[in-house]
Amino acid sequence: MDREAPPGVGHTAHVSGGLSFPLSVVPWGRWVVATTVVLLVGLSLYYLTYQPYSAAKSFIAAFGSQGTTTVAERLTLAERSFDTFRPLANFPRAIFFNQLAYQWDDMSEEERSQVLSLVTRELSEGLEVEPQSFPLMVSAVLVLRQDPATLPMVEPLLERILEIAPERVQTHVLLAEQELIEGNPEEALRIAEEYQSRVPGTEWFFREVSGPGQLSRLTP
């Protein structure tokens, strides 16, 4: 009468060179396989679940805490969020840069210096991951154009923005506004009118260019 093989007998472990041995001969075989599976599952859960959660938690704290924390504290929280899960950090970067640009007038000189330091650093790291990130470059321009020290960084960004998104209205709005900042109102108006002639109904987007007194609002 046939007997059922004991556990492990009949199962083989394959090694290099095409040789195979019963797992009963390699007693640690099952343990290695099981440990490897558990480790891979654990790493996957950490990388795909906990890290994004932790990054989102830090970002929400940075984005939603204006008025209750200092700018330096918010910058620290934002940077912690970006560092936690860098593969998906560019979208939060763009949102945060936009917020910083909007709140620029309320910042002290020291806070502005801290903001510019973070934006230049995070912009560089973000473009390494995603060289053609339109939202990241646009939001960075909104911050960097605020200060004469970082204004030279804007022109190369605008060239890249024009290259990857030549038909987008925001591209031409930024180009026109930059001409205003540099003291070329006629060129700014030319850019605005040329785009509006090609894409009717976009006058509202160029209000910063054609509206009265807008130059003083855009000049650093």
Image: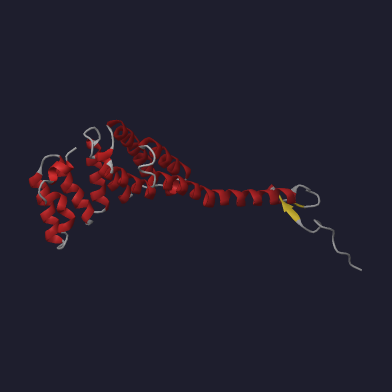
Question: Relative to residue 147, is residue 89 drawn left or right?
Answer: right
Q: Is residue 166 visible?
A: no
Residue 121 or residue 208, whichever sits in front: 208
In percent of width and height, residue 179 lies at 14, 44
Q: Within the image, what quadrant is residue 153 found in?
A: top left
Q: Within the image, what quadrant is residue 123 found in?
A: top left
Among all residues in the image, which is located at the extreme front?
68
With respect to residue 7, does 103 lie above or below?
above
Question: Relative to residue 135, is residue 58 drawn left or right?
Answer: right
Where the C terminus falls, by quadrant?
A: top left
Q: What residue lies at 16% left-to-right and 39% top-to-bottom? A: 219
Residue 186 or residue 17, whichever sits in front: 186
Residue 106 or residue 177, whichever sits in front: 106
Question: Relative to residue 175, is residue 113 drawn left or right?
Answer: right
In percent of width and height, residue 183 lies at 11, 40
Q: What residue lies at 39% left-to-right and 39% top-to-bottom? A: 69
Among all residues in the image, which is located at the extreme bottom?
1
Question: Relative to residue 213, is residue 32 drawn left or right?
Answer: right
Q: Is residue 160 visible?
A: yes
Where the N terminus falls, by quadrant?
A: bottom right
Image coloring type:
secondary structure
In percent of width and height, residue 206 lies at 16, 53
Among all residues in the image, which is located at the extreme top?
110
In percent of width and height, residue 191 lies at 13, 51
Q: What residue lies at 27% left-to-right and 52% top-to-bottom? A: 164
Q: What residue lies at 9% left-to-right and 45% top-to-bottom? A: 185
Residue 82 or residue 28, whichever sits in front: 82
Among all residues in the image, which is located at the extreme left?
186
